[in-house]
Image: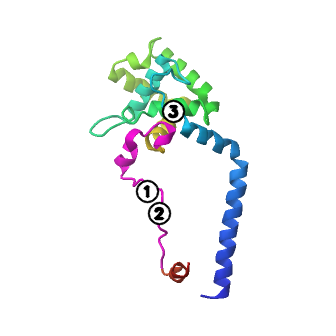
Amino acid sequence: MSHGDIARRQFLRTSASAISAVWLTAAFGEMAAVSALSCAPERGAAKWKSFSDADAADVEAIASLIIPSDGTPGAREAHVIDFIDRALDSFAKEQAPLFALGLADLRKRAGGTSFASLDASKQTALLHELEQSKSDFFTAMLASTAAGMFANPEYGGNRDKIGWKMIGFEDRFFWQQPFGYYDRDEARHA
């Protein structure tokens, strides 16, 4: 291995450290919010942080249609609603008005009744209508449901790592680098 290769590797390590430090400093507020969120106790019997009981039931019903429980656990079993509730109370606060307006629009489309109280065929038809209208609320629900299903469980969703088990994700959070021919000698000397 030449001296140039070592200098390049050192440059890359130093650059990566510097960039990480700058990013962490710039995103300190967001990092603190995520940290506080992960340390927050489970909701349990307490009231919702971002929803009324009716809103929570509607959001859970929508999430359960997006990731249903048909042969495998779905959004309901993964407690996706807990993730969305906590997110809208912390790092995704700016989306709370979108959810409030979207739920109001959904109730209007449902004839003034709650989405959760509709039968499955009417729920599916309404959700399809929202999707076809390219509703920002539908897009936000889709993204939030996926995030709640597959995010780290400490953020409120993915209860019992259901989402990770569903996709075969190994919860190791430590991975040995895949050393290859290009840096085999570096790995031996490290």
SS state under label 3? loop
Neighbour tally class for label 2: few under 14, some 14-19, many 20 plus, Cα within 10 Å = few
Question: Which range of residues does the magenta coloring cover?
Answer: 153-180
Q: Is residue 93 left or right of residue 74?
A: right
**Is 45 positioned to the left or the right of 9 in the image?**
left
Residue labelled with disc 2: 175
Q: Which residue is mark 1?
A: 172
Query: Where does the image place residue 179, in percent across and percent down from the top left?
Result: 48, 75
Vertical placement of residue 98 versus 107, above or below: below
Cβ–Cβ under 8 Å for marks 2 and 1: yes
Q: Residues within 10 Å of mark 3 (few under 14, many from 20)?
A: few
Residue type, mark 1 in image: Arg
Label 2, secondary structure: give it. loop
Task: Select label 1 or label 3 by which is in front.
Answer: 3
Looking at the picture, which amino acid does disc 3 mark? Answer: Pro
Q: Nearer the viewer, residue 186 or 92?
A: 186
Residue 106 position, x and y percent, is: 49, 20
| Amino acid type assigned to the residue bearing label 2 in the image | Trp
Q: Nearer the viewer, residue 146 or 6?
A: 6
Q: Picture quarter containing residue 19?
A: bottom right
Q: Residue at x 39, y 23 (%)?
A: 123
Task: Give above or below for 34 relative to 174.
Answer: above
Vertical order, 20 against 11 (above or below): above
Among numbered discs 1 and 3, the one appearing first in the sequence: 3
Q: Looking at the rendering, in which quadrant would you find the N terminus?
A: bottom right
Q: Please give the residue where the numbered disc 3 appears in the rendered image.
A: 41
Q: Is residue 137 found left or right of 28 in the rendered image?
A: left
